[in-house]
């Protein structure tokens, strides 16, 4: 039978109650499928409801989240949790319950972890929520100020398509590369992996330039030209490109006059009239180490043909992360091709599998969440700040918010030890809670820090339906095996919790009845494609969805008639100078190679998404483990940097930042610029040998800083950090991240 995940659709077989095989359906499928068999019944599965002994014996309250667990029956666990939820909401109000619960969880439309949790919490009075995401949190706040809320949304879901690129684009200039591995992943998954095919088509027709610190940031079939840029310096290169367009009379002044506001301020800035520093290629070269002649030549190449400027999500996950996005949009405006087929500005090619598919798909089935009566919210990347500084004001999006006083956090379908930075600080923040509740399939680092852990069924242990944006098929996801141990569907858990709290979560329906209900409501709703009754849909394994390409990507109507189709900005035009966001500028970060700090921490570590797992999901699986070096997360080094430190592939290195230390396996490669190191995010946090390192399994978040991109966006800045790397020759501690905690 077939099932789906965010990383694809695959065939799965079971025998004797065990998953025995998982096979991709297409040649370009994600290698993460290789984690399924080994991960589903791994020793790290949570078998029974478990309560931290200290919490069980002493009651809720702040304190270190360590020690062993006590396994209890379901009735005991649900009674304890219901009583604690009632205590918190009665004494402190529902705003003292944090239910942001960031994470990807299951690809299913019904068993979507956050939707289920939010419906439950809404049914019992509401919760403090989180907004935005870790992937593009800075952009989500910034872009509405520059192009309006609707155009910002269309930049994500209705951009220039891959097909437009292949047909119309002469030159694709991508800051941050165009990684194939990121196109394997899409929220909700895809019936077939299509990203590699799109990339190959563009490679046959379009000249591609990848500006990145990593040569292999661009899929090899693109045949991209690599221009090496030191991390955190892309904005300087973009400003220098604008400087060339201005000084060499290549800027499209007519476009700037009709479609933008603020171009004159940009000109004055890049010419040095505002701060006395002209943003010349020579200036940018001293910052980025890109030769000035290369910058100047690239500006001329961009001006002579149809050019698309793309910026990947990772560039805005750093200090002042708004600036490369702002500068790229400004650069595209000075070229004057925004709104033309295959030209202008994009923010996401090479970042997500559903980006640029070019399909205006129908609305998909959803599980209704109800209404949250609590107004409090925080940006998702400010969780530690919220717990450490309750009641304090902080700036956000041109205004001011106040951190609520949270007593209980409820997490389902996510792992903040993957997404969040500075794990020492995060652990301190979690210790301020009275209670941390986690639903999990496995004993993840987050589960191990919880007070109450409820075992939940995996994707293969329940029924659901799946589809992603622009997908070709709405797919049935049948149950493959029975739930592990005493695991239950989250729907079952919330229904019984709600009943204990005097609320109605399930409306008297079971999970299969709800699955049929949301499907039939979708089938009957206006705009849905023809679809059979649920029984027929389930028997056939799904229903095909119409593949209707859109011909009017973002900015098309605005380009044709800015007067009748204005943007939702104060001026109705693209705001290159914004009263809230300012204008694109070079703001020196505190983490880059040009600082005195870099004499001690002399390598710039890039922390990007892994290729053989989604975030931290199934890190113990065979595919993820196949990428490890010396049994832990790899650290890639340039040959010159490795030689200077006496390191070779297969060695173990100790990596140190100003915040923490980790052990990693060394992989030497010439795909990195000298002075740059790289590790993937998502290794499970393992603090089992603190005398050696804060994490002996290579979780980069012990190194990264928990500081916001800026007061405007308050997004994550964890994509890179300055580090020192030395050879580790001491006794190597075992990795215990995948061992379950002691339970009695």
Image (tube, rainbow, N blue to C red):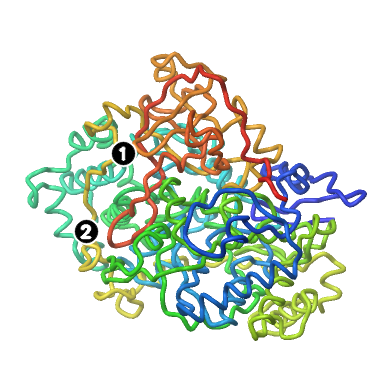
Q: Which residue is mark 2?
A: 583
The answer to which of 337 and 718 lies nearer the viewer is: 718
Residue 64 at what x, y percent from top left? 49, 52
Among all residues in the image, which is located at the extreme front?
A: 58
Q: Which residue is mark 1?
A: 298
Tell me, yes or no, if residue 207 can be seen here: no
Give the quadrant of the N terminus.
Answer: bottom right
Tag 2 secondary structure: loop
Q: Quadrant of residue 607?
A: top left
Contact between marks 1 and 2 (CB within 8 A): the answer is no
Among all residues in the image, which is located at the extreme right?
A: 16
> Taking 569 as reference, is 225 left or right?
right
| Residue at screen point 30% across, 39% down | 591
| Residue at screen point 14% across, 52% down | 269
> Taking 549 as reference, is 108 left or right?
right
| Residue at screen point 54% across, 30% down | 634
Q: Quadrant of residue 140?
A: bottom left
The answer to which of 9 and 557 lies nearer the viewer is: 9
Residue 204 at what x, y percent from top left? 55, 41
Sequence-wise, the earlier of marks 1 and 2 is: 1
The answer to which of 99 and 173 lies nearer the viewer is: 99
| Residue at screen point 56% across, 58% down | 103
Task: Quote the CA–CA distance across marks 1 and 2.
Answer: 23 Å
Tag 1 secondary structure: helix
- Mark 1 or 2: in front is 2
């Amino acid at each position: 039978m077939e099932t789906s995940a965010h990383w694809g659709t695959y065939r799965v077989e079971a025998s004797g109650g065990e998953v025995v095989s998982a096979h991709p359906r297409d040649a370009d499928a994600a290698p993460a499928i290789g984690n399924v068999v080994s991960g589903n019944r791994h020793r790290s599965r949570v078998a029974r409801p478990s309560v931290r002994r200290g919490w069980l014996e002493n009651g809720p309250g702040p304190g270190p989240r360590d020690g062993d667990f006590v396994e209890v029956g379901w009735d005991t666990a649900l009674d304890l949790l219901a009583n604690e939820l009632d205590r918190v909401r009665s004494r402190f109000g529902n705003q003292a319950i944090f239910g942001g619960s960031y994470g990807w969880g299951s690809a299913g439309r019904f068993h979507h972890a956050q939707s289920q949790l939010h419906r439950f919490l809404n049914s019992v009075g509401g919760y403090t929520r989180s907004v935005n995401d870790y992937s593009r949190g800075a952009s989500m706040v910034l872009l509405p100020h520059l192009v309006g809320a609707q155009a910002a949304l269309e930049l994500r879901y209705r951009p220039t398509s891959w097909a437009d690129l292949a047909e119309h684009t002469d030159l694709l200039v991508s800051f941050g590369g165009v990684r194939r591995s990121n196109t394997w992943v899409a929220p909700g998954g895809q019936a077939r992996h299509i990203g590699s095919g799109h990339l190959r088509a563009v490679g046959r027709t379009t000249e591609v330039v990848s500006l990145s610190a990593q040569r292999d940031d661009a899929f090899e079939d693109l045949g991209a030209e690599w221009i090496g840029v030191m991390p955190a310096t892309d904005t300087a290169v973009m400003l220098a490109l604008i400087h060339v367009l201005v000084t060499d009379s290549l800027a499209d002044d007519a476009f700037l006059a009709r479609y933008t506001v603020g171009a004159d301020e940009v000109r004055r800035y890049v010419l040095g009239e505002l701060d006395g520093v002209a943003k010349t290629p020579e200036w940018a070269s001293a910052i980025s180490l890109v030769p000035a002649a290369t910058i100047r030549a690239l500006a001329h190449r961009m001006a002579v043909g149809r050019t698309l400027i793309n910026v990947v999500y990772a560039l805005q996950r750093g200090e002042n992360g708004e600036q490369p996005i702002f500068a790229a949009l400004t650069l595209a405006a000075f070229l004057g091709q925004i709104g033309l087929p295959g030209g202008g500005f994009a923010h996401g090619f090479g970042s997500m599998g559903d980006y640029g598919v070019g399909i205006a798909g129908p609305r998909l089935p959803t599980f209704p969440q109800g209404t949250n009566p609590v107004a409090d919210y925080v940006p998702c990347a400010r969780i530690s700040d919220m717990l450490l500084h309750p009641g304090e004001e902080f700036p956000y999006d041109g205004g001011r918010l106040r951190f609520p006083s949270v007593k209980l956090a409820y997490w389902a379908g996510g792992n903040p030890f993957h997404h969040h930075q500075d794990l020492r600080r995060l652990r301190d923040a979690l210790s301020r809670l009275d209670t941390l509740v986690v639903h999990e399939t496995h004993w993840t680092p987050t589960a191990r820090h919880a007070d109450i852990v409820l075992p939940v069924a995996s994707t293969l242990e329940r029924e659901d339906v799946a589809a992603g944006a622009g997908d070709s098929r709405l797919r049935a996801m049948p149950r493959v095996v029975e739930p592990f141990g005493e695991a239950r569907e989250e729907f079952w858990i919330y229904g019984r919790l709600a009943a204990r709290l005097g609320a109605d979560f399930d409306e008297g329906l079971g999970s299969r009845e709800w699955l049929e209900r949301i499907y039939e409501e979708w089938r009957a709703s206006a705009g849905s494609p023809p679809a059979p009754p649920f029984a027929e849909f389930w028997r056939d394994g799904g229903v095909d969805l119409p593949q209707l390409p859109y011909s009017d990507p973002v900015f098309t109507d605005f380009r044709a008639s800015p007067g009748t189709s204005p943007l939702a900005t104060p001026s109705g035009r693209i705001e290159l100078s914004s009263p809230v966001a300012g204008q694109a500028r070079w703001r020196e970060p505190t983490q880059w190679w040009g600082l005195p700090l870099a004499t001690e921490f002399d390598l710039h570590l890039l922390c990007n998404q892994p290729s053989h797992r989604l975030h931290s999901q199934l890190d113990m699986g065979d595919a993820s483990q196949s990428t490890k070096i010396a049994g832990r997360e790899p650290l890639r080094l340039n040959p010159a940097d490795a030689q200077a430190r006496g390191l070779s592939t297969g060695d173990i290195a100790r990596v140190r930042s100003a915040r923490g230390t980790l052990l990693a396996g060394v992989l030497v490669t010439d795909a990195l610029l000298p002075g740059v190191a790289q590790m993937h995010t998502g290794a499970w946090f393992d603090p089992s040998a603190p005398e050696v390192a804060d994490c002996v399994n290579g979780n980069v978040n012990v190194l990264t800083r928990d500081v916001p991109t800026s007061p405007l966006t308050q997004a994550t800045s964890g994509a890179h950090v300055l580090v020192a790397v030395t050879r580790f020759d001491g006794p190597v501690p075992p990795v215990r991240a995948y061992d379950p905690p002691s339970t009695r």
